[in-house]
Image (cartoon, helix red, strand yellow):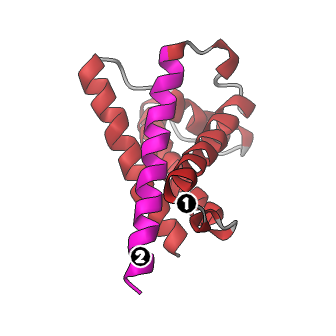
Amino acid sequence: MDGAIAGAVGSVALNVVTYLDMALRARPASTTPEQSAQRLAELLHVGLGPEDRAANRRSGLGPLLGYATGVLAGAALTVVGLRRLPGPVAAGLFGAGVMLASDGTLTALGLTDPRRWSRTDWLSDIVPHLAYGVAAVATLGQLRRGR
């Protein structure tokens, strides 16, 4: 449970950093969350309804998939014992693990190819995932101290 809570807090941190980046650089939102929702619906043979409604469902499902990834990754990474490592190492590994899970899924779905990313693309992905790791590890530490 602690890992799931830490993953949820990490997901909020990741989103805050992402939205700050969008605001500061005036960059558009990524379409990959909606694309992943569409692709998963297709693979699972789940209809999302008429296009006007399907677009709205993809807009809701995409971010929910991101939160699910963050929460489940927090739980999984806690189970494998990363919280026993020094804070900065654990934060880096937490962030890298979530980045691998999310980018690996997007790559497997055919929605991105990290080999074609620019330096800016990589930084736009690494920094929010590092924020995830820092927030998740800090949350785990706080939960542990609270007991």
Please tell me whether residue 31 is drawn above or below residue 57 in the rendered image: above
Which residue is nearer to you in this view: 90 or 36? 90
Look at the magenta stretch and give its main secondary structure: helix
Residue shown at 64% from the left, 23% from the top: 112
State which quarter of the image contains the C terminus: bottom left
Q: Residue at x 66, y 70 (%)?
A: 79
56 shown above or below 120: below
Q: Secondary structure at mark 2?
A: helix
Report the span colored magenta.
120-147
Position of residue 10 measured from the top left corner of the image (x, y, whole percent): 43, 54
Residue 45 in picture, x, y percent from top left: 71, 43
Q: Is residue 76 visible?
A: yes
> Can residue 41 be seen by looking at this rendering?
no
Residue 144 place in picture, x, y as percent: 45, 78
Q: Residue at x 60, y 62 (%)?
A: 85
Label 2, on which residue? 143
Q: Which residue is mark 1?
A: 86
